[in-house]
Structures are given as structure tokens and as C-alpha cells.
Image (cartoon, grey):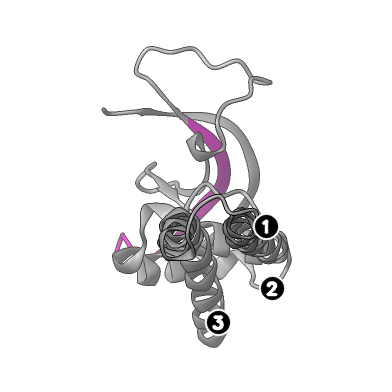
């Protein structure tokens, strides 16, 4: 399905070289926008699912919205990098970006704290599954040879979801942050 990009507000403007237009100097804006179904109306204070909100930069030369990955946006917002380097860094990062790099809407610190909390919760859930198997075994519910594989099968999806969806996205963000800081 194709979504339309609707501008909500402009956060900042700056002048920099445009790497998509032969490095000609132009004015850029950092915009907050939302992806919606074609023809949908967007009310200014409406709430949508987090993945639909985006932040991006728009060049005066091309007027194209280019999504900023969360790592770039929050590094600019936290004053770790100046706005003038955003177009160059985004241009260099674009070939490697994935959909998981957008729309999380958390700073690096918030994302790290959330990853640790979820890691602990998933770990506790896994331990409690194993504890339930041992408790059932002590009460004579079913044999250990049956309970152990059952606990492993039940805890595997929890660990898999945490690793593939949360931990890898966090690790990727941290690698991008190191790369960006080495390029500034």
C-alpha cells in the first residue's frame, strides 16, 4: 500500500550543501510529518501509531521529504551534531538504512533503558517458565524428560522476539551512532 506524506510542523531550518543536487548550497528544513492513507485528513493534534510519524529533511531545491533515521534526528536534537551535516550524513547512510531505523521515536538513552528493561522482563519470563516445569515435576505432574523440552519450546519464542526485534535494532542504532560520531 502506498502512503501519502503529510507535513505537520517544521522544527528548524538551516543552510547546507545538498548532496542529492551536486552539492549546491541550499536551504533545508527539518520537518515532522506523518504517513497516512491517500485522501485521509490529518488533524494537527491527532494521535497515530508510532511507526507512522517521521522526521525528515527537505531541500528547497528538490522539495523532497527524506526520512531521517532516529539516530540522526536524536543526535541533532541532543546537540551532538550540527544540523548542517545532516544532509551529508543521511546521504552516506541511505544505502544501509532499514525500516527498523525509523519511527521508534526514542532517544539513544531511552532506547537503551527500554532494551535493558525488556531484556530483564524476557529473562524473568524464561526463568519462570523453567520454574513452572520444575514445580510441576516436584508435584508429580509430568516427567522431567517431557517438561524440559516443553519449557525450552515455550521460552524460545520469547528469546527470539527479544533478540531479533529489540536487541538487534538497539545494537544497530548504537553502531550507527558510533559511525556518525566518527564522521563529524
Mark 1 or mark 3: name the one nearer the start of the chain. Answer: 1
| Total labels drawn | 3
Mark 2 or mark 1: name the one nearer the start of the chain. Answer: 2
The CA span between labels 3 and 2 is 12 Å
Task: Report the residue marked by disc 1.
Answer: 121
Q: Nearer the viewer, mark 3 or mark 2?
A: 3
Mark 1, other Cα within 10 Å: few <14 / some 14–19 / many ≥20 = some
Task: Report the residue marked by disc 3.
Answer: 178
Span shown in magenta: 19-34
Q: Position of residue 66 (x, y in %)?
A: 41, 49
Tell me the number on the disc at residue 183. none
Q: Position of residue 74 (x, y in %)?
A: 64, 60
Q: Secondary structure at mark 1?
A: helix
Residue drawn at x 27%, y 29% as measured from the top left: 2
Q: Toward which corner of the image does residue 90 lie, by quadrant?
A: bottom left
Proximity of marks 1 and 3: CB atoms separated by less than 8 Å: no
Amino acid at each position: 500500500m502506498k502512503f501519502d506524506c503529510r507535513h505537520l510542523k517544521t522544527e528548524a531550518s538551516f543552510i547546507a550543501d545538498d548532496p542529492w543536487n551536486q552539492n549546491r548550497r541550499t536551504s533545508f528544513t527539518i520537518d515532522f510529518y506523518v504517513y497516512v492513507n491517500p485522501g485521509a485528513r490529518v488533524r494537527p493534534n491527532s494521535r497515530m501509531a508510532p511507526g507512522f510519524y517521521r522526521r525528515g529533511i527537505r531541500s528547497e531545491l528538490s522539495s523532497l521529504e527524506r526520512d531521517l533515521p532516529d539516530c540522526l534526528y536524536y543526535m541533532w536534537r541532543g546537540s551532538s551534531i550540527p544540523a548542517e551535516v545532516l544532509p551529508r550524513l543521511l546521504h552516506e547512510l541511505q544505502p544501509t538504512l532499514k525500516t527498523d531505523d525509523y519511527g521508534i521515536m526514542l532517544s539513544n538513552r531511552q532506547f537503551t533503558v527500554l532494551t535493558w528493561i525488556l531484556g530483564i522482563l524476557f529473562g524473568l519470563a524464561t526463568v519462570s517458565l523453567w520454574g513452572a516445569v520444575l514445580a510441576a515435576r516436584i508435584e508429580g505432574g509430568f516427567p522431567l524428560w517431557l517438561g524440559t523440552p516443553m519449557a525450552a519450546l515455550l521460552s524460545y519464542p520469547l528469546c527470539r522476539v527479544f533478540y531479533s526485534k529489540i536487541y538487534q535494532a538497539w545494537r544497530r542504532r548504537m553502531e550507527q551512532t558510533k559511525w556518525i560520531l566518527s564522521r563529524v
